[in-house]
């Protein structure tokens, strides 16, 4: 018998998501959001998702909220750095009471995933006492132990996790690019370790297993279902491969801001052009243009 | 940065004080010096993404009096940034993926609670907020309307809550000084100030608050004006603060010294600090 490959296409992977699931999404700010799968999930029209993204998240989360797929959010923040201090669809939905936010900070977000990974009912943490977090998030209970006050952080367990990485082999070993000094990868590991169900890695390319064996220290996650998806993080950046497309972020943020202020047309147009109108990921690539994408590459030749 | 935006910025800076004069660059340089003077040799200083003035301050401190200061910076990751990569030397001036040359280590996790380890998260945390109040609490969660409903959903507390609670020293920094930013009581608390900390059994509180108008410290848990910047007045600072600022005789913030000026030339050779972090009258939002 030969070793089983763990490779799927984007539609198969997106079909794993059903209404009401808790979905973990990788990324940190502009880096490594699994955008191709996010667009595929939106096209399936799933509803009432709980999104676990971050520690601080970005456009992958905002787009799912903006498209009406998410009901609940577990993240320490949603923002696009200098492009938008507050992500527009997140802001609109929160202000209209259309989503519930599991209020936390980055450390608490991480601890909730650790608690799920460790299989413990909670972790005591000193950060967050004396703040609004326990009042806004009833899951964070204040407790006193040995005369000191703590927040009790319960586990958060995704049903499924999607991450984007530079490479993987066909057996589900997803790994960082050699050049990926700038990328923080702890969210990928934390989400995968906490996950109840499948972990799906979209990757820039599938590489032979012997390359993975040559540098095991680069492997972030093993046992993933692998989907080869070049430019799968766009408009986000992919660590060691390409930079975020800030012009695209600005266009998205402006459309989101128009909608928040009462004009839904530009945001609807964005969704039509980049999400609903691109049945396959290759169609999306065409809407952006190969020349523009090439200009975003960061890897040294 | 667009020319229009730069002009708006220059106008905003000109409005900072009663006197005409100061451009954004000199205000930004002064703030970098003010923060640098607070950083001690051997400390670890942490701040968020895209905080160019704070990065410049840390680099200045390293050159001037703190060669063993460790900088823990949320790295900028985009290439072809819309705002120039301030505070980096000429060799690192253009493509941000080359900034990795400056990294000595890359911590992968958010372990922030042990202050003794040589790998501890930080000693000094520089933090801001949508709102900052009299006792130094910050808020990134949201702003309420008069009737108590959520009027503005903020980005979220990001990394500020736990680090701001557990760091040995907290310095508040705001590129804006308005009654909207500086309020009597924050609507939500991301990082607790002096009284909220005491009520929660935590010692201490923020050391300082630095803005484009002045430097505040804390007396008995309440913000107090420590110095006003040369381009403004005590009256102006008070008018633009949403609570009564305690102040005795207030000295003028010392301008950059010749050694500080020389170090600024090295840290920010292209004067790019002018374009960042600084919206004294809140013009951006």
Image (spheres, rainbow, N blue to C red):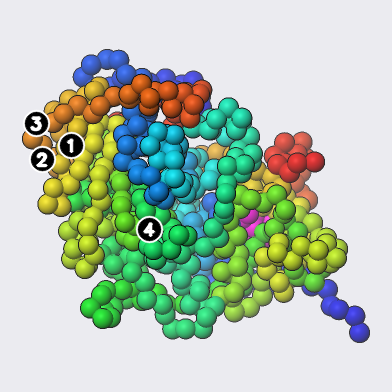
Disc 1 from disc 2: Cα separation = 9 Å
Segment tinted magenta in the rendering? A30-38
Q: Are marks 4 and 3 on the same chain?
A: yes
Q: Is mark 2 on a helix, strand or loop?
A: loop
The answer to which of marks 4 and 2 sits earlier in the sequence is 4
Disc 4 from disc 2: Cα separation = 28 Å
Q: Name the residue under label 1.
A: B226
Specify whether A85 is left or right of A286. left
Q: Mark 4 points at which residue?
A: B163
**Residue B249 got which mark?**
3
Whether pointer 4 and pointer 3 mark residues with C-beta atoms closer than 8 Å, the reply is no
Q: Is residue A10 above or below residue A236?
A: below
The answer to which of marks 4 and 3 sits earlier in the sequence is 4
Q: Residue at x 72, y 41 (%)?
A: A297
Whether pointer 3 and pointer 1 mark residues with C-beta atoms closer than 8 Å, the reply is no
Give x and y (percent) for residue A68. 53, 60
**Residue B246 got which mark?**
2
Q: Is mark 1 on a helix, strand or loop?
A: strand
The answer to which of marks 3 and 1 sits earlier in the sequence is 1
Give x and y (percent) for residue B196. 20, 61
Disc 3 from disc 1: Cα separation = 9 Å
The answer to which of marks 1 and 4 sits earlier in the sequence is 4
Q: Is mark 3 on a helix, strand or loop?
A: loop
């Amino acid at each position: 018998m030969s070793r089983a490959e763990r490779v799927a296409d984007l539609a198969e992977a997106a079909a794993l998501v059903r209404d009401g699931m808790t979905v973990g999404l990788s990324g940190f700010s502009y880096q490594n959001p699994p955008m191709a799968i996010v667009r595929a999930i939106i096209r399936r029209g799933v509803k009432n998702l709980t999104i676990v993204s971050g520690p601080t998240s970005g456009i992958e989360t905002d787009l799912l909220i903006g498209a009406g797929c998410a009901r609940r959010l577990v993240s320490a923040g949603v923002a696009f750095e200098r492009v938008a201090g507050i992500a527009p669809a997140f802001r609109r939905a929160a202000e209209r009471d259309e989503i519930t936010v599991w209020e936390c900070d980055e450390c608490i977000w991480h601890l909730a995933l650790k608690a799920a990974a460790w299989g413990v009912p909670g972790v005591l943490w000193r950060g967050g006492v004396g703040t609004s977090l326990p009042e806004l998030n009833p899951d964070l209970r204040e407790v006193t132990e040995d005369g000191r006050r703590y927040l009790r952080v319960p586990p958060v367990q995704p049903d499924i996790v999607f991450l984007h990485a530079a490479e993987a082999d066909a057996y589900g070993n997803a790994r960082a690019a050699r050049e990926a000094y700038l990328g923080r990868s702890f969210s990928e590991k934390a989400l995968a370790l906490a996950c109840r169900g499948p972990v799906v890695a979209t990757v820039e390319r599938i590489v032979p297993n012997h390359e993975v064996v040559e540098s095991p220290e680069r492997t972030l996650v093993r046992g993933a279902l692998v989907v080869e998806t070049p430019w799968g993080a766009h408009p986000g950046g992919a660590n060691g491969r390409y930079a975020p497309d800030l012009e695209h972020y600005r266009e998205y943020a402006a459309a989101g801001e128009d909608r928040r202020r009462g004009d839904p047309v530009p945001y609807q147009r964005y969704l039509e052009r980049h999400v609903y109108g691109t049945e396959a990921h290759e169609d999306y690539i065409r809407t952006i243009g190969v020349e523009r994408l090439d200009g975003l590459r960061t890897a040294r030749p | 940065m667009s020319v229009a935006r730069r002009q708006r910025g220059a106008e905003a800076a000109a409005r900072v004080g009663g006197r005409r004069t100061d451009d954004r660059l000199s205000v930004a340089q002064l703030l970098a010096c003010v923060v640098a003077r607070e950083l001690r040799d051997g400390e670890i200083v942490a701040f968020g993404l895209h905080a160019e003035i704070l990065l410049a301050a840390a680099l200045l401190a390293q050159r001037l009096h703190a060669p063993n200061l460790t900088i823990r910076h949320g790295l900028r990751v985009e290439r072809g940034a819309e705002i120039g990569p301030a505070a980096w030397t000429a060799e690192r001036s253009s493509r941000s993926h080359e900034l990795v040359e400056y990294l000595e280590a890359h911590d992968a996790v958010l372990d922030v609670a042990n202050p003794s380890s040589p790998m501890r998260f930080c000693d000094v945390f520089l933090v801001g907020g949508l709102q900052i109040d009299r006792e130094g609490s910050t808020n990134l969660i949201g702003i309420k309307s008069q009737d108590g409903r959520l009027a503005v959903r903020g980005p979220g507390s990001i990394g500020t809550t736990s680090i701001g609670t557990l760091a040995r020293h907290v310095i508040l920094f705001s590129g804006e000084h308005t009654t909207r930013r500086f309020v009597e009581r924050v609507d939500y608390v991301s990082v607790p100030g002096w009284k909220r900390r005491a009520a929660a059994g935590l010692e201490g509180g923020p050391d300082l608050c630095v803005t484009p108008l002045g430097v505040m410290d804390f007396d008995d848990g309440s913000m107090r004006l420590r110095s006003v910047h040369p381009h403004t007045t005590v009256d102006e600072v008070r008018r633009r603060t949403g609570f009564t600022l305690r102040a005795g005789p207030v000295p003028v913030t010392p301008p950059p010294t010749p050694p500080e000026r020389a170090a600024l030339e090295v840290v920010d050779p292209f004067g790019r600090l002018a374009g960042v972090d600084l919206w004294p009258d809140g013009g951006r939002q």
